[in-house]
Image (cartoon, rainbow, N blue to C red):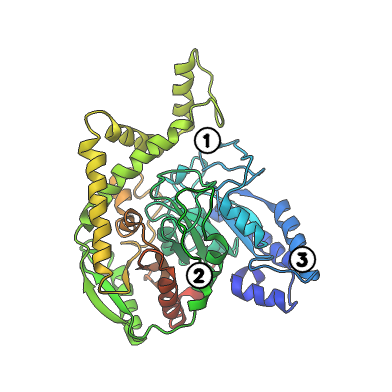
Amino acid sequence: MELYEYGIDDLRKMLDKGETSAREIAASVISRIDAVEERVKAYVTVTRDEAFAMASRADEQFSAGRKASLSGIPVAIKDNMCTKGIPTTCSSKILKNFVPPYESTVTTRLGNEGYVLTGKTNLDEFAMGSSTENSGFFTTRNPWDTDRIPGGSSGGSAAAVAAGECIAALGSDTGGSIRQPASLCGVVGLKPTYGRVSRYGLVAFASSLDQIGPITKTVRDAAIMMNAIAGRDPLDSTSAPVDMPDFTSVIGQDIKGMKIGIPKEYFIEGMDPEVDSAVREAIRELESLGAIPVEVSLPHTDYAVATYYVLATSEASSNLARYDGVKYGLRSEGKDLMDMYMRTRSEGFGPEVKRRIMLGTYTLSSGYYDAYYKKAQQVRTLIKNDFEEAFKNVDLILTPTSPTPAFRLGEKTDDPLQMYLADIFTISVNLAGVPAISVPCGFTSKDLPVGLQMIGRHFDEETLLKASHAYEQSTQWHKRRPSL
């Protein structure tokens, strides 16, 4: 195996034993990027020089007897997290030349753990999309079939991990944007509890829904990444003041007697039959490990997509009002101030971002606020209550991550509603603020990955990690890699 094919845990052991160096790992990953990036297009910016400089520092620290949990590990960062001195574009023309003067909390914490930055990954513009086709620059492709989408909005991060163009990555998840691309690319994606990971330095899409999390090759690697990035941050008022566990401590524990909820609302007509079959087989596998399946109901699931697209677009309308050509980002010339505003936003934003700004502005407008935004907040509470009621009887909830495998490029671009429905199994998790993980659970007859979603109680990522690791180790799906 080449070095870029290993995960975090394996590379750490090799580094500890002196079997390789951080610079050799970085060289392997950069060489892999050179070999396949033209076909995958996972990166907006490849930080080649920074990667080798950071790897050299890691090797120096090893020589001095100092090492941290991610020392010498190449990690890619979704390009909506601020990196001081390195462009952060959100894959939008309006921020094409924006270079942040400060560092996000998550990248600061990764830096404290010795990571090596390989670059900034592509996404749907401002994280608004499910396929990475809404990027203002180019479309990322699925490493398993480059004629298909990698998912979104963290499609670049998921594709980079699957293709071996990094060892791990960070994504952000507003309505499924970590879990859905992880599912479609055959890797692990964890969306933590809202407030578990600081959002300071994350360019906001929908502030009450956004959450940063890891995309990795294995569940253990996800736990290692969580140890690095999670925890209270005084720079983020929504960061929760809760105790920080060692997320790796539950890895390897058995799940005998664990109650797993199977919600009847998630096994629906229209779901791809091969996805349905793979997920049902995963349930049987968990049962063989001692887990106890229990049917549960989440009765307000049908309202989740509508609720999400009222709340998310409303918050997007507010958050994106700052991009007016005055303070930073693109500035188009106009005959007066209003003309400059209009030209800047018309030329800087893509069609999906404009669509969501208009939807959000409408729902917040006078006369419609109570009918739409207020009503959506009330339904959100009902969805959250559904989960709390279900968790009185089960330890976690199990569903498909996506109703279909990766679809072909361009297949849904002319029908935004069909694109929005691709997130039907992931959106409720963000509305409720609970944690969820997607792990590989099979492949279709066309060799496309299928993902299994596990949903947990607030701030109980450990149960998710324990159960998903037990499942992962009893199967071989996570070991398969695309042959680019």
Q: Quadrant of residue 396?
A: bottom left
Specify few, some or many for label 1: CA neighbours under 10 Å numbering under 14, 14-19, or 20 or more: many
Q: Which mark is residue 52?
A: none
Which amino acid, by three-letter code, is at mark 2?
Pro
Q: How many marks?
A: 3
Q: Which residue is mark 2?
A: 245
In the rendered view, tell whether residue 41 sits above or below residue 23: above
Which amino acid, by three-letter code, is at mark 3?
Gln
Q: Which mark is residue 93?
A: 1
Is residue 265 in sight in this rendering? Answer: yes
Q: Residue 244 location in percent, x, y?
A: 51, 66
Image quadrant containing the C terminus = bottom right
Q: Which residue is mark 3?
A: 61
Q: Which of disc 3 and disc 2 is earlier in sequence?
A: 3
Horizontal placement of 293 versus 482: left or right? left
Specify few, some or many for label 2: CA neighbours under 10 Å numbering under 14, 14-19, or 20 or more: some
**Separation (CA) of disc 2 from disc 1:** 40 Å
**Separation (CA) of disc 3 from disc 1:** 39 Å
